[in-house]
Amino acid sequence: MHSGPYIARMADDRVEELFGELPALMLTGPRAAGKTTTARRHVETVVRLDRAAEATAFMADPDAALSALPEPILLDEWQADPNVLAAVKRAVDDDPRPGRFLMTGSVRADLLGETWPGTGRVVRLRMDGLTMRELEGRAMATPFVERLTAGEPGAFTVPADAPDLRGYVGLALGGGFPEPVLRLSPEVGRAWLEGYLDQLLTRDVEGLAGARDPARLRRYFEALAVNTAGLPEHKTLYDAAGIDRKTAVSYDQLLTNLLVLHSLPAWTSNRLNRLVKSSKRHLVDPSLVGAALRLDEAAVIRDGDLLGRLIETFVLAQIRPELELLPGSARAYHLRDRDDRREIDLLVELPGGDLVADEVKATAAPDSNDARHLIWLRDTIGERFLGGAVLHTGPRPFALADRICAVPICALWGD
């Protein structure tokens, strides 16, 4: 793992906030997203339960082992001894002081257990891979969604080294997993990502999903990669993978449980009764698209449909961690009507019902036509619409209409 200086994560402040009032916190997220590295920053004692020498005492008497350690305690790879969770429950029941236990590890024991003893005692916080904001040292900058509420191009700053289209594709294929991004060359990073995917689709599903055919699961994952950022019919996917509908639904749930497939629900409104209600699906990290399909930058740029899907998946991977940490009850959605005449890639409903919205375009020169769905939404819902952006691959922000701007994608990690 990366041995250089720690890169601050957007989740750090939220961990401090929650751990300042809660006794136990569990960091969840895809494997290898950097959860353990972040958790170490917030504890006094680290216990690696996947190491036999450290796990022995917990296997013998987890209650005594916990009580003997300086707090806060990180229980890393807690699933190696699921009984430790029951010990945490008992410790919290006896003494609910804040800031006692942090846990990281696999989702397997969580999903396989007949009961979940952490209910009411352990609060979860999700962490995905690194964002460009974090890599650029701006983890604590004003979230993009908050800047969008201004509805003006002056709210967005573009970095001096703004990428071009090929640069964005390279960033997307590089992804946000810390190991390849921070330590490995692009060539070795691709090998790491392919190995990660092999591990995910073989060993990580063992036991969690029962008997699986790795070849069929891989074909299904490849179909999802081709259709990331889309609303494909299940039949499109299961025909491509050579499976039936029941198996496709099961695979969807499996990959969601492994935290590598994200469903963006459809937004609904009483004013707009012809909206589709199906969720839009994205792979959580765009690098998994390249790993699944064995594509490089040139191959993506040659495929206009996949190019747009990859760029949108990259944008969602930048914004999703912000949404996890926004105060209140901000919710993310997509919007599409039944006639496919209007579509908005991301709509965020803020506390109180106000909205901001984004369209993602793989173009360097967006115009008012690219903003027509945002304009329609603004005119339909009125003052609830605070701001919209057409996120593009060009170099500068500019106004397209009232409360709607063209914004370079790299403004997501600008000051």
Image (cartoon, rainbow, N blue to C red):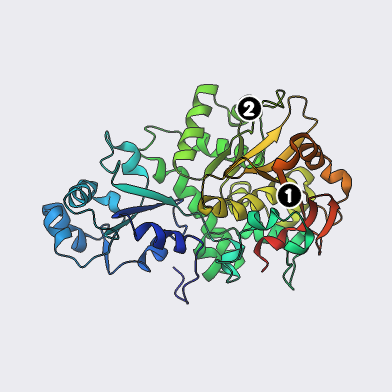
| Front residue (pair 228, 201) | 228
- Residue at the disc numbered 2: 277
Specify the quadrant that holds the N terminus. Answer: bottom left
Q: Position of residue 351 (x, y in %)?
A: 57, 44
Between discs 1 and 2, the one toward the N terminus: 2
Visible residue check, residue 294: no
Mark 2: amino acid: Lys
User: Would you say the residues marked 1 and 2 are in contact, meaning their CB atoms lie under 8 Å apart?
Assistant: no
Residue at 60% x, 64% y is 133
Residue 334 image point, x, y percent? 66, 38
Please provide percent x and percent y for residue 363. 82, 53
Does 174 sit left or right of 124 as displayed?
right
- Visible in this render: residue 382? yes
**Rendered image: mark on residue 361:** none
Q: Which secondary structure, mark 2?
A: loop
Residue at image location 47% in from the left, 60% down from the top: 11
For the C terminus, the quadrant is bottom right
User: What x and y, as percent, mark residue 165?
Assistant: 77, 59
Residue at the location (39% across, 49% down)? 124
Category of crowding for the residue at label 1, using alpha-carbon neighbours closer than 10 angstroms: few (below 14), some (14–19), many (at least 20): many
Q: Give the class, few, some or many, for how many residues have Cα within 10 Å of label 2's Cα (few <14, many ≥20).
A: some
Query: Could you tell whether 225 is left or right of 48 in the image?
Result: right
Which residue extends farthest bottom? Answer: 5
* Count of labels in the image: 2
| Label 1 sits on residue | 387
Image-quadrant location for residue 70: bottom left
Amino acid bearing label 1: Gly
Q: What element does badge 1 sit on?
A: strand
Residue 286, compared with residue 340, is above or below; it is below
* Picture layout, residue 231 above or below residue 414: above
Q: Distance between the Cα atoms at labels 1 and 2?
A: 23 Å
Foreground: disc 1 or disc 2: 1
